[in-house]
Amino acid sequence: MRAVVVAVLAFAFAPSLAAAEAPAPPIVWKNQVRRPAPGVVPALVSNKLYLNDCRPNGCTLNPGSDDSRTNHSSIVQSQVRLDAWAHGDVMWAELVQCVKDTFLPFEIEVVTTDPGTANHSEVMIGGLAAQLSPDLVAGGVAPFIGCGATEDNVISFVFAGGSTDLEFMCGAVAQEACHVWGLDHELNKLDPMTYLDLGTLKRFQNASAQCGETLDAPRECYCSGNTQNSFQYMTAMFGGANLPPPQLVVSTPTEGQWVQPGFPIRAVLMSPLGATSATLSVDGVETASLSPGPFGFNAPATLAGGDHTVSVTGTDGGGRAVTETVNVHVTATCGPSSGCNDGFHCLGGFCLPGKQFDGGLGADCTSNDTCITASCGTANGEQLCTAQCDSGNSCPAGFTCLGANLEGGVCWPVGDDGGCAAGGGGGAPGLVLAGLGLLALVGRRRR
């Protein structure tokens, strides 16, 4: 005789529904699992998942062997009726889309039209748990955990009559469908198969997780040993979807840009499966990693002057990696005993490129990001890349320390008039230094 388990998604309905109620305890009805018979190769089940809203008049269920084609369920003990979805067309469409997005990485076809006699899996969404069984307290229920995804035409349930939380119901639909296909409860709070942080958006995680219902009581997984990886399991059972590859863009720095050691690096990974991690490499050597995004790094502050290659490798939720590379020029160091090449200015211990280079000292700028010094100053209607004066209010040849009589003077081209109203608002003359985070009021320089 093959054992039967009823895996129940048991928890308080969404926080927005009744925040004061404690979650119902996790329940596994009959505490058994359906496993393939020894020596039998499991047949492939249908990849069609039917979401049934039971509209307009509810769904009638009869007891018996599970069969979604005839509305028979092993859970019910007599003929019962599950109320129809009661939250309207707009929310139904949102729920269906959320479920589709959840199963996006896999070859799962989510439909809302009854497949009839064709093989499929089904989730009925509506009504209350007590309509199936008077003693059932749960947000959803599946008739068993089916190791290896061996059975078609099984009905699971999500009880939407007690909740209006879209993300709660979306995760519940995914969880109950996947119980029938062989996935257990797990302790990764980001995954649909968890009881943790219910009511938050869940997506299948490409990571091994302990099984169980609560963090203080991990247990062996019913089908897969000590851990399960829901993403890899679903990919093995149904195949990966034919999705566009991920794309990665390094927005800062740009190709050929002059930068100082420790320069910022920003990257964006775009994928229908989301962004999970990224690594930074400089000249082929990994220097940093982040998980999850957003992806912002800093190059090593000890990076020597010269040409360097910066590579960012991003990985999406499907484990697919993509790399983007930019080449940069890092400023050399300088000092009293070591000067700079022509066209460069020694300031702050570095050979800064001059105004003939984009972002160089004294070059036109529109924002801090466009300057190698990360400081775009405004004076007399001009916006120029600038930097703080060295000790003793000193600046390179061709520059003067504007605002030297105040704290935080900056080097400004000698041939430019530094007096104007800050921010174009009139009043006292001034200099705006957004990159340095200060407003230094100065008078007009004498000629």
Image: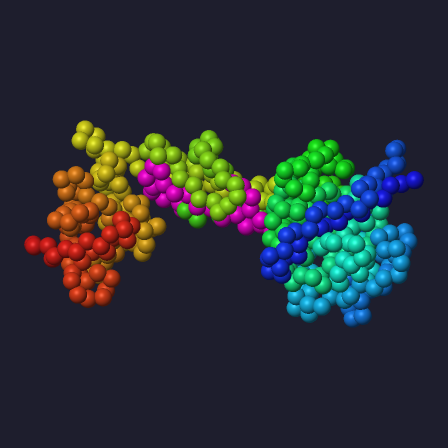
Q: Is residue 181 visible?
A: no
The total number of labels drawn is: 0
> 426 left or right of 266?
left
Where are the magenta residues, as a range? 253-278
| x then y, percent, for residue 179 | 76, 46
Q: Nearer the viewer, residue 190 or 397?
A: 190
Residue 267 lies in the magenta-colored region: yes
The quadrant of the picture occupied by the C terminus is bottom left
Q: Nearer the viewer, residue 285 or 133?
A: 133
Residue 17 lies in the magenta-colored region: no
Q: Is residue 367 visible?
A: yes
In this rendering, the answer to whether 65 lies above or below 53 is above
Q: Residue furthest left?
A: 447
Q: Nearer the viewer, residue 103 or 36?
A: 36
| x then y, percent, for residue 27 | 74, 47
The quadrant of the picture occupied by the N terminus is top right
Residue in the picture at 15% in, 58% down: 419
Residue 397 quadrant: top left
> 226 left or right of 68?
left
Residue in the picture at 80% in, 46% down: 29
Q: Nearer the viewer, residue 248 or 115?
A: 115
| x then y, percent, for residue 33 | 81, 41
Q: Residue furthest top?
A: 337
